[in-house]
Amino acid sequence: MLAVQDLGVAFGDIEPLSSVSFALERGEILGIVGESGSGKSLTAMSVMGLLPLQGGRITRGSVNFDGQELTRLPEKEYRKLRGGRIGLITQNPMTSLDPLQKIGIQIDSVIELHLGLNRTQARARTVDILGSLRIPEPSLICDRYPHQMSGGMKQRIVIAMALAADPDLLIADEPTTALDVTVQAQIIKLLKDLVKERDLALILITHDMSVVAQTCDKVVVMYAGRAIEQGDVQAIFHRPQHPYTQALIQCIPHGLAKGQKLTGIKGVVPTVKNYPQGCAFHPRCERAQAICSQQQPAFISVENSFEGLRTATAGSTMKSTVACHFPGEQA
Amino acid sequence: MLLRYAGQRILMLIPVSICISLVIFMIVHMLPGDPIDNLLRIGSSPQERALMTAKYGLDQSLFSQYLLWMGAMFQGDFGQAIVLRRPVADLISQNLPYSLTLGALAFAFSSVVGMLLGTLSTVVKSPMMERFVRGFILLGSTVPSFWLALLMILAFAVTLDWFPVSGAKGWESLVLPVLTIGFGGVALVARVTRVALMDAKREDFVMLLHAKGLAPSVILWRHLFPHALLPVVTILALRIGWILGGAVTVEFVFGRPGLGSLLIRALGQRDYPVVQGCLLMLALAVMLGTLIGDLAQASMDPRVREAKK
């Protein structure tokens, strides 16, 4: 339903995003992972067509949504998609609602705009949606202001807003980063259930590998504006090829005894202006050779046989794509 | 909710007014010089002077003078002007309408034009517009109003002969003073509106508004503008009081009657009751302005309504 091909984004002369490709079908959850500044949110903004708002533009590639080419779509048409067929859930629920307007009105406006219902009908639908998100006393909530609610509740409101016009695609940009850990799990579960109930496609942007492992069907691992590895979640987690992906997976803390050190990745993500030559990860990579700093690695398809794994997919073959000069499992 | 908030705010004005009256009284009476100098003929004897001082109660202690003044005021008596020899209430009610008309017109002019200009400067994205608005804001906030008043008179009254040079006859005489006072106000309001709008544009929730598929014009008028209005209202509220008293120099240059002119004249003559009355009126205007501003803000922003509970 959504196919992104070789997407490139530029802000002036700077190109923070290049050659990002992925595809997504209804009922699927695609995770986009990476550290801060790796281009996850930019990818989301590109699909939403909201790059001009931040001063960026798409320079290359295509974004195809249900047969419609979005990169050439006139703004007026795009506005019908936004909020209508593509819903966005943003990172910080504390600041993503208009503090001067009541909750109800903010959700109603999406319904009135995209479904053409009148005010009373829109409110009835708003109450319905709030109820379906397990928000207690939905009709009372409508008369509240955002500052009167907790973070988790606000994020549910934002989700309700994204769902209001019955979209086909949801983009959730770090939907749980700003929330309490207990609330995080609830929101992730809620999103997962929604995909199942409504047969949605969901792009889940996060920097939390464990969330990806629990939730997603497909994963795109981003580093310095490139999708360095992607594939089915099983393939990525059981047979990661790129050293960066491997390092990310190692960062998930599990079964650590007290006193044991948490693993991290040395160094930081380079800023857009200082993307290194060749493979952007080479300064932090243990596997790096001379070629890594000279030539950008091409995308290679890898077929994984899952024999010997005790998973549901054991025995099947799963594909992934990796951009590395020396792919392969860890030595 | 809003009513309770309003009630609390109004109650709070009582102690504030008492403090202000005390301060005004003390400042005026501690200034060197006194009104008796203006009443005595040159060469009068010290006895005559003492007699005159006693007649106006100026020989009593400051504290009892204050109580006397306050006591009378509670009965609606602002006292008798010592030099001008008329009831202060008469003087004020004679001059206040002129100041109010000028102030209200200048206020309306500066808020409407200022907000329009400020909004326009963020919406129209042309370098020409940008430069024009910036230049205008810079000029408007730096050019002193008394000098601008003189230029206005020179250009539009003397050279072009479109409007009268001075006086307060008919609406024609209002145009130049309103423009003069309004000019600075327009610049101020335009600047605040512009900055507030640009700040509002950067807020997180604006991204989500675009993601909802709302048209940019809807986002501007239904969401950004109300946000930008919050600081603008604060500035405007402060200006309500300022415009009544701050128009002093402009009233003076244009030779208009008004509270400002009255105050200046009374100050020169140390006419205590008149100075006190005028200052009190101005202080009242500032307090009312702030009150109106706070109430307006509370009616627009639910967070303000609740924070002050």
Image (tube, coloured by chain):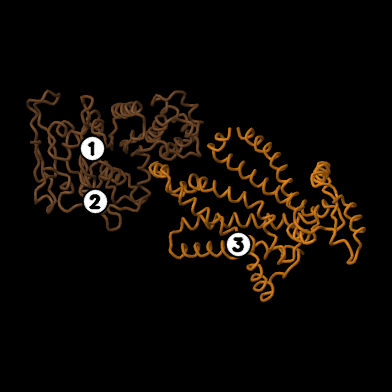
Residue nearest the observer in this picture, A120 or A197 = A197
Residue nearest the observer in this picture, A314 or B306 = B306
Which quarter of the image is occupied by the N terminus of chain A?
A: top left
Residue closest to the far front? B46
- How far apart, in angstroms, are the residues tagged by discs 2 and 1? 18 Å
Q: Secondary structure at mark 2?
A: strand
Q: Secondary structure at mark 1?
A: strand
Horizontal side of A149 relative to A159 (left or right) equals right
Residue closest to the far bottom? B159
Identified at 85% across, 51% down, the residue is B58
Q: Is residue A204 above or below residue B144?
A: above
Mark 2 or mark 1: which is in front?
A: 2
Mark 3 lies on residue: B183
Mark 2 lies on residue: A8
> Residue A182's x, y, as percent?
34, 26
Mark 3 surroundings within 10 Å by alpha-carbon count, few (fewer than 14), some (14 through 19), many (20 or more): many
Chain drawn orange, letter? B
Mark 1 surroundings within 10 Å by alpha-carbon count, few (fewer than 14), some (14 through 19), many (20 or more): some
Q: Colour of chain A?
A: brown
Which quarter of the image is occupied by the C terminus of chain A?
A: top left
Identified at 50% across, 34% down, the residue is A145
- The amino acid sitting under disc 2 is Gly
Mark 1 lies on residue: A24
Mark 2 surroundings within 10 Å by alpha-carbon count, few (fewer than 14), some (14 through 19), many (20 or more): many
Identified at 74% across, 49% down, the residue is B26
- How far apart, in angstroms, are the residues tagged by discs 2 and 3? 49 Å
Q: Are marks 2 and 3 on the same chain?
A: no
Horizontal side of B258 relative to A72 (left or right) equals right
Q: Is residue B140 above or below residue A162?
A: below
